[in-house]
Amino acid sequence: MEKTVGKQSIRFEEAIHLISAASIAGKKEGEGPLGKLFDKISADPCFGMETWEKAESAMQRSAVETALEKAEMESKAVRFLFGGDLLGQLIATSFGAEELGIPFFGLYGACSTCGESLALAAMTVAAGFGDPVMAVTSSHFGGAEKQFRFPLEYGNQRPLSATWTVTGAGAFLLSKKGGRVRIPEVTIGKVVDYGVKDSLNMGACMAPAAADTIERNLEDLGREPEDYDRIITGDLGYVGKQILLDLLKGRGIDIKEQHMDCGIEIFDRESQDTHSGGSGCGCSAVTLAALILPKLTSGEWKRVLFVPTGALLSTVSYNEGQSVPGIAHGVVLEHC
Amino acid sequence: MEKTVGKQSIRFEEAIHLISAASIAGKKEGEGPLGKLFDKISADPCFGMETWEKAESAMQRSAVETALEKAEMESKAVRFLFGGDLLGQLIATSFGAEELGIPFFGLYGACSTCGESLALAAMTVAAGFGDPVMAVTSSHFGGAEKQFRFPLEYGNQRPLSATWTVTGAGAFLLSKKGGRVRIPEVTIGKVVDYGVKDSLNMGACMAPAAADTIERNLEDLGREPEDYDRIITGDLGYVGKQILLDLLKGRGIDIKEQHMDCGIEIFDRESQDTHSGGSGCGCSAVTLAALILPKLTSGEWKRVLFVPTGALLSTVSYNEGQSVPGIAHGVVLEHC
């Protein structure tokens, strides 16, 4: 069987299994539509630590430990850890990974990192380089606002196109065998830049990358949208969703029936004041662990395309007037 | 043959070849001991752009393009790009990768990223997921000082333990066949934290991680230091070198004869005012491309262990009083 398929996809000779997953979320996420599905919800936004960054590290560790507990494994059994977050120099992950003592690959793909980590973890297991392998990603509302936007105390007004960074961490344990969900293929994204410069409209920045990766996945694997029960983007939100549907329609691809967005699922638009939806590495990660995987495990869904989306900006690039390019990685998930 | 060896190493069934490499460096690096060995030296620290960050992106692109030219290939022939830099949210790499149009994995391992990118690129080629695959890393003195330390205009005094961030980018093209240098094994590092908090003594922060990875490599692969012509760390500098030698000696491992450090090689200590030496993702990358690979290609060296070292700090973690953990990845390089 060909391993490299089309221009950007990889098909594993034997699909890689997701044998365990865990989701840790913050209070606001716990009050949202997915609240009852998370493994743990912390009422304390600092997760018992003194800073948001340490809180995020603690949340990541908790996600990894919970996934290990479910698989009845210890961290020393894990061969490699692929992890990332939104913070400059990945400090949440670096400090989180330290205590775990697992050989570590640090990744940055903004909010697409969940897809990047799953793809690389699956590639590593498939090649026989390690088994099991862990993938973990996280984001924290307080840490992200501090890093990218305004001090929380300033209480800035948020435009309706803005998304709300999810406080959450998702961890996934991958192996050659076990569990009821497997990864048969992945599609690796390119950096796509339509020149959008509005960091408070990240859905618009990321939608072109999502469209590119979805189109590439369908073409590389010879599939139609109907071949998926759901095509699930990471955090385009309401604004980005419409742009994605329009962009793909212009290319003759209609995914209206299949499309779902983690950023839309995670918060209640009316009651939670989250405007365009949720975002952050943690958004797609906790939605995958809490909502998507259980539906695949039960067989309610047979096959989905999971496409975490990232907006590649920093305060430096923004202040220097650069655009916000996007990237999206596609992970095919199947019931088995 | 076993693919996973010992606790942290991978042995490829067939060693992966480095078929092309390129080094782009700044003016100061060009005036140093390796000056004549670089592919290109830019007299303009901005590489024709208006900001240091854009300069770094331009330098990365130039490294990739030069490596492709040497291999007589176009970027569309490259299946995947593994890349990273020191800047928050990897903006140098993201904006550099954009124009190349290659499916992209963003990596962050601070100055160890050169090792991380080579390891993942080799793993991807070895597994048959893509061929050729490109690895690229860079750093820029101006961008790094702005990001991590003081405005250049401030002209702060630098302690003697401080290193000088190298302005440079190195790109490496990996394939199953070709060239005279191959990668038979890699050793993936763990995050190691000895509690050092001095961001102006990064050698001390990273030496424990380097010691850990070197010890692990020797143990996993059943080798002695003498089995390597050189054991080459990334950017420990003079201060970190001594700590590394002492730490390993305490564990019964003497690498004094084999040890070399890219940060020490790249600048002239007396005339260039660089104190403890060079550092940055670009330091190990350009030294590998310009100095190490030619010696392996000619057969002067038969086998070396290349160990880029990273200090996992950000201004946020530093300002919040956190320590600076280190990480180091080992890549074995052989003449063939």
Image (tube, coloured by chain):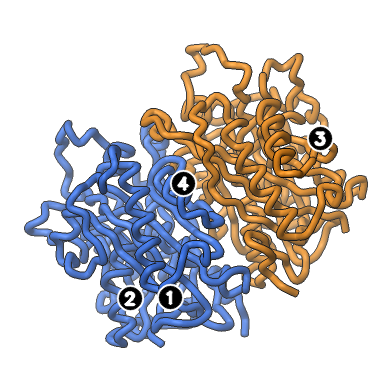
Chain colours: A blue, B orange
Q: Identify the subunit bearing mark 1.
A: A
> Mark 3 to mark 1: distance in Å?
47 Å
The answer to which of marks 1 and 2 sits earlier in the sequence is: 1
Vertical relation: A24 (above or below) B244 = below
Dot 3: chain letter:
B
Q: Report which residue position mark 1 lands on.
A: A18
Q: Chain of mark 4?
A: A
Callout 3: 10 Å neighbours few (<14), some, many (20+)?
Answer: some
Q: Secondary structure at mark 4?
A: helix
Residue type, mark 1 in image: Leu
Which image quadrant: the N terminus of chain B? Answer: bottom right
For disc 2, the chain is A
**Residue sitting at x 53%, y 30%:** B144
Q: Secondary structure at mark 1?
A: strand
Precedes in sequence: disc 4 or disc 2: 4
Task: Locate residue B220: give its quadrant.
Answer: bottom right
What number is the disc on residue A94?
Answer: 4
Q: Considering the image in quadrants, where does the C terminus of chain B appear?
A: bottom right
Kindly identify the amino acid type of the residue bearing the numbered disc 2. Answer: Leu
Amino acid carrying label 4: it is Ser
